[in-house]
Amino acid sequence: MTIYEALPHAAKLLSVSTSASHIEAEVLLGFALKRDRTWLVVHPTMPLAARTLTQFWNMVNRRARDEPLAYITGRKEFYGRPFYVNPSVMIPRPETEELVRSAIEYVHRRKTRRLTVIDLGTGSGVIAVTLAREEPSLRVIATDVSARALGMVRKNAALHGVAKRITFLKSDLLASVPIPKNSVIVANLPYLPESDRKTVAPEIRNFEPARALFAGRDGLAVIRRLLSHIAKLSLKPQALFLEIDPRQRKRVVTLASRYLPHYTCSLLRDVSGRDRIVQCQRIEILSHKGFNTSRS
């Protein structure tokens, strides 16, 4: 069987689980061959070895049963870079790139040098690693309650050459995190309400770690706990960036304003125009001369 013959058959099998069946078939065959999709187009008549076909059909069948493509290949792109993923961590979403972008813009506006960014619930580490790569002056702390997730973060940090610039801590939110001076908290915490378990796509519900997705009846249990913890800190962060469900925007801003009265909180939109990021900044920081406080 050639590449040209295998791909249409695979796409047909994949059509039950994805609307991008032709693209995903190419991704899986390219992964089996250790080639990119362009190479497949240039070599359509290449015969496929039996071992390659066995691996390919195995992956196609897994995807047809709703297993996420990223878990099958063990890879996911984020902010233009490849990252390792496995079922112990949530698959990075494009929306989270806006969280990173917002934090980077904040760092660029600040006059203070040697800021420390704390990435809570780091998962695969895409936020921590990307910030370390994009801003060499940053100190980065990556935390997660899961030891397996922290192992994945270390692997991704090594992949991108920033392992020496990231501190890895096993911690439930801020419980084991020393809060340094001039810190910023960035977090993509679980925020889906339990009622969403029945309605999310099977590839999410059946394969991604529930602890990284769902957070109580209203989806705000973990965010509420974080805000309460920050309110009790003697040394508070200069800013907080939270990814949220757009449905929660008003409630999260209200909660943040209640727990953090000395902060000003606003909403930032994602690439689809939805309110996706809650940004809270200390009022005394905002008053510094030359700091831009306009809404993005």
Image (cartoon, rainbow, N blue to C red):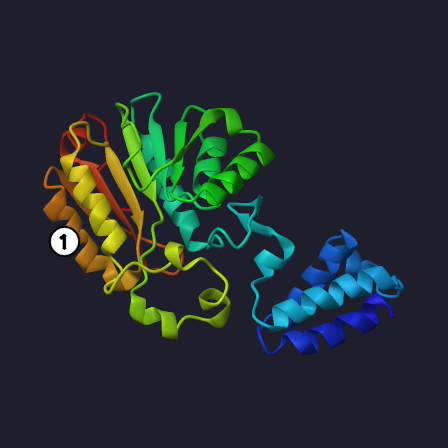
**Rendering coords of residue 83 (x, y %):** 56, 45
Instruction: Answer with left or right where residue 285 lies relative to residue 41.
Output: left
194 versus 35 height, above or below: below
For the residue pair 103 and 202, the one nearer the viewer reads as 202
For the residue pair 222 and 165, the one nearer the viewer reads as 222
Residue 62 sits in which quadrant?
bottom right
Q: How many marks?
A: 1
11 versus 98 height, above or below: below
Instruction: Answer with left or right where residue 83 lies relative to residue 147.
Output: right
The kind of secondary structure element at disc 1 is helix
Q: Residue at the location (75% across, 64% down)?
A: 56
Residue 185 sits in which quadrant?
top left
For the residue pair 200 and 265, the one nearer the viewer reads as 200
**Rendering coords of residue 294 (x, y %):** 23, 42
Tag 1: amino acid: Thr
166 versus 252 height, above or below: above
**Rendering coords of residue 65 (x, y %):** 59, 72
In the picture of the structure, the residue carrying the numbered disc 1 is 254
**Dot 1: few (<14), some (14–19), or many (≥20) neighbours within 10 Å?**
few
Q: Is residue 108 in view from this perspective?
A: no
Q: Is residue 227 in view from this perspective?
A: yes
Instruction: Answer with left or right where residue 250 lies relative to residue 38.
Output: left
**Rendering coords of residue 265 (x, y %):** 19, 45
Q: Residue at the location (40% across, 56% down)?
A: 271
Instruction: Answer with left or right where residue 264 lies relative to residue 198.
Output: left
Q: Residue at the location (51% across, 24% down)?
A: 164
Which residue of the protein is positioned furthest toward the top in this rendering? Answer: 113
